[in-house]
Amino acid sequence: MLGLQLAGGPRVRSAETAGPDLPFPLIERFETYGAAEGLPGHKIQCVTRASDGRLWVGTYEGAAVRENGRFHLISTNAGLSHRMVMCLVEDPRRGDLWLGTMRGLNRYSAGRITTYTQTDSGLPNNVIYGLAIMNDSLWVATAAGLGMLELKTGSWKIYDHNNTVMHEPWVYAVKSAGDRLFVGVWGGGILEFEPANGIFKEHRDPDRDMHFDLTPDDGPVSDVTSWIAWDAGILWQSTYFGLSRYDGSRWRTWQEKKSPLPSNFVNFVWARGPVAWVGTDRGLAVTDGSIWANYRTTDQGTGMLEIAAPGRPVENRRMTTALPNNFIHGIWVDDHEAWLATADGLAHAFLAAPRTAGKAGDAKTNPATPSFGRN
Amino acid sequence: MRKLSLILLLALASLVGLTLWVRQTYWGDHRRRMSGQTDLAKVGCLNCHLVSTASLRWSQPRPHHDTPAGLAVSPDGAMLYIALDDRDEIAVADTASRQVLRRWKITGRPWGLALDNLGKRLFVTCREGDRLAVLDTGDGHELASVPTGRGPVAVAFCRTLNGERLVVANSLSDDISVLADSPWRELGRPAAGREPFAVAGSPDGSRAFVANRMVELASVKTSPASELTEIDTLSGRAVRREALASAHLSESVCAVPSRSWMLTPVVKIRNQVPITQAANGWVMSGGLAITDVNTGEMLQMPLDEANDYFADPAGLVVDPAGGRAFIASGGSDVITVVDLERMAAWLAKASPAERREAIYDLALAPEYVVARLPTGRNPRQLALSPEGSTLFVAERLEDDILLLDANQLTVRGRIRLGDGGSDDPIRRGERVFTSSAYTFQHQFSCRSCHPDGHMDGLSYDFDGDGIGDNLLDNRSLLGVAGTEPFKWNGKNPSLDVQCGPRFAKVLMRTEPFPPGPLQDLTTFIKSLPPARSARRGDGKLTTAQARGKAIFFATRTASGKEIPHERRCSTCHRPPLYSVRLPFDVGTQGTSDTTKAFDTPHLLGVGGTAPYLHDGRAQSLEEIWTLYNPDDRHGVTSDMNKIQLNDLVEFLKTL
């Protein structure tokens, strides 16, 4: 599909071999945080860094916020509606942090938590999978539809299978994209919604087959949407049956048997420019759709980086540090670092600067090159 | 002739018989069916018919007065700006001659005022216009009008490293508008507590503090708390939201220049004890909350004395040296002068436990209260001249400004704004409403539980048994005219009875209101219009609100099944008052309730009267049906989906 030349199979790269130019930075090393470092639980669901620099972490045992190098617990004792924190989003206008849990929505405002549940507010359902902010409205992906809270008036609207083209009400993700929203529906593909004029457009897998992408690049790889991401005009869809990309006119799809995608079970995707950071059950993949850098932890606990590029043999590098777990639940990335929520700890990934042509892979002349251990 | 008489006699007998038959059958059946009542003793034609809001006192024209609200003093102390909210005007007075020089028209009920550092621009919050107006103090023309949240009541001007900021407390939308200059626009809209009502900047302008008047919504069994919100003026974000434990009705906040203190007058509330304990001073008292902005420590100090209370603390200012605080007691017509040095000295020597318990010690006030200065009726807002020598007191129900020498604590004179309105029974009634003179030891006024005629969001135990544990939701008085009977059990047929001798015996613990003041009081209460609703400015309903209206008036469920008449929303909550003023059993009897049937509240302004149900158990409109209507006795709602319930709620908020 991508025209990758994988003939000869993967091989371990020598230090002298020039690597491909990379459109994204590689990870230099990982640091891991768990209960010993003050996190309330080892199973991390989501992570985000707020505009004030504070790192917010959602776990199965409550939320934590990292300030001055220390994690502070925010639990049900502090007013959180449920311990299992599923998603986080910051309201940049107010500085509030919204937390979606398995039982209710929470607004963290300057240390005070206000909860919203399906019984005391217009929230469609207590099980919250995703959150997005669009101007002065909060969008909530729930197990019974998409909710919208107008932050200035407190009014709620609900969009579900009763009043939209939504195939079913089980909404897994919502993402703000300029003047529109993309809504990931569990078995219903993606809805593109323009709130200004109330228009819904449905993006479904044309072949309607959940497991197999019978006709690649004809639409979403599957209707089963586990997460979506959007940046720079590009939409990414993660599914349990592969990965999709939509640039506004064309779709591209990837599945593990036909591409370097490490697993069809894609749990999460983060978009940064034209690059996707893809969380799977077999590690982390970073790709612009052409070049892939896949990170995983081997059975022996060693960190391994696999670089796949068109026209080049797959290159494997051993890393000095490793992901704490290959099951990636959540990702947050900027130019310098990535934070990875995994099934067994939080990983802090330090990024190197992207390599440029002519210097790629030259560790001696390019101090920014990752200092990987190599076979 | 005899034949004709016989025919007439038979016709008359038939008519009487028909009338009796109709009365016995159709008439009784009609009343039973249409009212949903089984006991028809209280059901009359006028419960449903010939009800009009046009005849109610609050919808009729009333006199307007020169009632002073917010005050601002020019940097040179020469001019005093006075918001006249009832006139839609700003008065400009010369402080030396004590004469009003000019009046500027401004729409939207001007309330809070602030000046820039040079005194060139006057910032005015327009409470009903949902905007902030910027006026040129040279000629009063409006330089800018900036939309804010709903019900802006207070504004503070702050200078930051990144330009000027205005911090506006939006009392109805429970948030804060932070405005940035060039041109003025909303930089941020952080959330506040419930009913943000006062705002003050820190001396360096980097922070603003917002006092919130009402307690947060919480279970009626928990101790209530209001909030002090701290704003970073540069970013426009909230950085701290501290709870003022068991305290509410804060209407002012002020920094102490020489210390890291923010002062907030509060009413210390103990609403869960039986109301009979008013006799022991256990129900409410006035205090001063001190927040150390550096350490976050919060203390509360009493302003009342063991046998004499100073109800409804409102305005607060501190002199430029930080030596004295002046607090207006709106209910007792007194300015309390606090020596902050003496208060600090007491705090310095007190143990942590003594500091924590200080608010309960009503013998403490003489340690730092150095004067109680009498004023005219209902002193509310205060302002100090820049050098701190003159204290300006807005005597709200006198239509004037009292000038006090802040050093000598003597009267300098008054700025007359109007005639005081003594000919107006509504004005006289408001004086009764806001006065603590009628309660035991002047502990509180009607306004202490009904600020501005509304409600305080609390539940109280009004049972005379003194046992407690039977809390009843405090209902708003806004729009209450024509909705008799009163009380949750519907036993008081009129406001005269409601506010009469029994009320005095149970609650006020004094002699009842004399007949004249009682009549004025009820006239005032009847003049209070309903609370502002969420209806759009053009009066039209949104699509969701229109769908909700159809649900409210529905006679069939979504599945087409007829809704029994007594379980339709509009049967009990019939327009135009949205109440037929009859008691109904909606399945909410609690373990301490002696009755199943409760008075049907009107729904005008219902969106702003949380909590709900007779004991305040429902913290939101949604909870009435999601948690407390399991048997569909409070309307048939169990077949509704969430979209329909949301639509219904959206419609109710427009009433």
Image (cartoon, coloured by chain):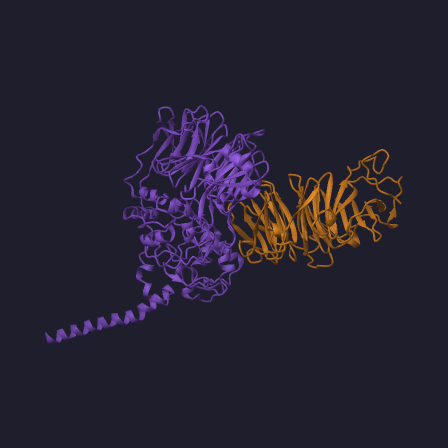
Furthest residue to the left?
B1
Q: Position of residue A182 (x, y in %)?
A: 63, 49
Q: In the figure, is residue B346 to the left or right of B277? A: right
* Closer to the camera in the image, B473 or A159: B473
Q: Position of residue B509 (x, y in %)?
A: 37, 50
In the rendered image, the vertical position of residue B581 relative to residue B282, given as above or below:
below
* Closer to the camera in the image, B129 or A286: B129
* Closer to the camera in the image, A62 or B631: A62
Q: In the figure, is residue B161 to the left or right of B565? A: right
In the rendered image, the vertical position of residue B564 relative to residue B412, given as above or below:
below
Quarter of the figure that contains the C terminus of chain A:
top right
Q: Position of residue A355 (x, y in %)?
A: 80, 37
Q: Is residue B187 visible?
A: no
Q: Quadrant of residue B28?
A: bottom left
Q: In the figure, is residue B571 to the left or right of B165? A: left
In the rendered image, the vertical position of residue B528 relative to residue B384, given as above or below:
below
User: Which chain shows up in purple?
Assistant: B
Q: Colour of chain A?
A: orange
